[in-house]
Image (cartoon, rainbow, N blue to C red):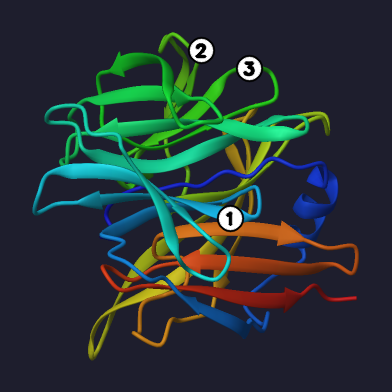
Amino acid sequence: MNAEATWVASVDHTGRMMIDVVRSLGRSTSWKLVDEVAVRGDVGHPQGLCRWGDDWLVSTVHPGSGTGELLVVTADGEVVRRVDVTDGDRFHPGGFAIESTGAHLPGCWIAVAEYRPRSTTTVMRLDDDLTTVESFPFDDHLGAICSLGDGTLFAVSWASRRWYRLDTNGRILEQQTTPSRWVDLQDIGHVSTGIGSERVVATGVGGLQTPSGPAQLGGLVAIDVDAMTIVHDTPVAAWMPSGRVATYNGAHVTVDAGSSVTLHCLVDDTTATIATWIADAPE
């Protein structure tokens, strides 16, 4: 559902390089599909995707049964664990943040909301065994949340219409209407800390009206969270074989020393594929 904000966060130490490379991408950037891994098992309606050790961690919602889950998926596509995160009427887990904890598997924050805009959310922090260790309620539908290096949280509402900076008790430190004019943030693919300000790289979808009907375009956005503003945004011209844009739902973004951006996406419902695209930054 492109009207929802779903995010995934991955924290690493390539912050400045990531932001610089993303800012070099533009409309003429070519995205090359280099890999596809079919996921074996029902993935529901995926919302978030992130590396979890050697595996993938996926957040997903099952609207028919009114349940939300985290899935651990191996690199070759086998679903090896399902963790129910349903909290009564709140069963929509959005994107989530990965917290770096040294040599151990990280924990994560996740927002589990009612399946409607302007509703309510239970924000949970899960440990490295995916057990809930703390939580707080929030009076809005949070479609995505990520932890930052200073210990605060960055979150967005349904369709990312409202941006929030929160403490870990749910107190609003800062709030504003999204500055984006064209893309609904769906996912955070990267969190950069320790580079002078808190930055995130998000992915999303923009809806367009054409003479032949509605169309969608993917987007990649670099955000300065301290300033609550967009540093750079660019279209992503990549589509799944099903026709959905690559950044429709869960995405994980990395950059290598050769200035290539790698985009891993889990987009389609029920029977899905984790697809990987690579784009080279201009020299």
Residue plotted at (36% across, 43% down): 94
Residue 181 appears in which quarter of the rendering? bottom left
Q: In the shown orientation, is residue 117 left or right of residue 19?
A: left
The disc labelled 1 sits on which kind of residue?
Answer: Asp
Residue plotted at (69% across, 18% down): 150
Q: Taking the image as drawn, is residue 267 in sight? A: yes
N-terminal of the pair, mark 3 or mark 2, is: 3
Where residue 233 appears, x then y in whole percent? 60, 58
Q: Which residue is mark 1?
A: 55
The disc labelled 2 sits on which kind of residue?
Answer: Asp
Q: How many C-alpha atoms fall within 10 Å of the one at disc 2: few (<14), some, or many (≥20)? A: some
Q: Which residue is mark 3?
A: 151
N-terminal of the pair, mark 1 or mark 2, is: 1
Q: In the rendered structure, are the residues bearing label 3 and label 2 in contact, judged by CB atoms less than 8 Å apart?
A: yes
User: Dot 1 lies on which element?
Assistant: strand
Identify the image quadrant of the C terminus: bottom right
Nearer the observer, disc 1 or disc 2? 1
Q: In the shown orientation, is residue 203 left or right of residue 95?
A: right
The disc labelled 3 sits on which kind of residue?
Answer: Gly
User: Dot 2 lies on which element?
Assistant: loop
Q: Which residue is mark 2?
A: 167
